[in-house]
Amino acid sequence: MKALRFLIALSLTCCAVSIAAQTVLPSLDGVVVDMGSNAPLQSATLELRGVSDSTKRYIAVSSGTGQFIFRGVAAGNYSLSVARAGYLQI
């Protein structure tokens, strides 16, 4: 089994938009690839978990092109973990 080595390209929409007194929470998206081959990783499960509040938890699964998105992410500090069959989590 390969060691879990992912290179994650993340882009963060960092400002909330106010429309008719409604606040739209930002999203976080990116691409997950195999570090050795740089090939996109399909069906990787990504978990974004609040550092100080573990009830803040978001799950995403990467597409065939390795793309993922977390929608409606509340402000805060998070840790990101990635898991996929055939890889060891390190």
Image: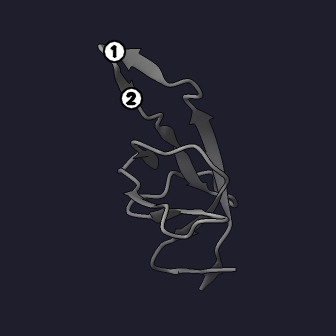
Front-most of residues 20 and 90: 20
* Whole-percent x, y for residue 15 in the image: 56, 24
Give the crowd class for mark 1: few <14, some 14-19, many >=20 residues within 10 Å: few
Q: Residue at x 63, y 51 (%)?
A: 38
Residue sitting at the far top:
20
Q: How is the image coloured?
A: one colour
Q: Quadrant of the C terminus?
A: bottom right
**Residue pointed to by mark 1:** 19
Callout count: 2
* Whole-percent x, y for residue 60 in the image: 40, 57
Q: Residue at x 39, y 43 (%)?
A: 71
**Residue pointed to by mark 2:** 24
* Whole-percent x, y for residue 61 in the image: 38, 58
Residue 78, picture quadrant: bottom right
* Whole-percent x, y for residue 16 in the image: 50, 25
| Position of 45 relative to 76 (above/below) | below
Tag 2 and tag 1, C-beta contact below 8 Å: yes
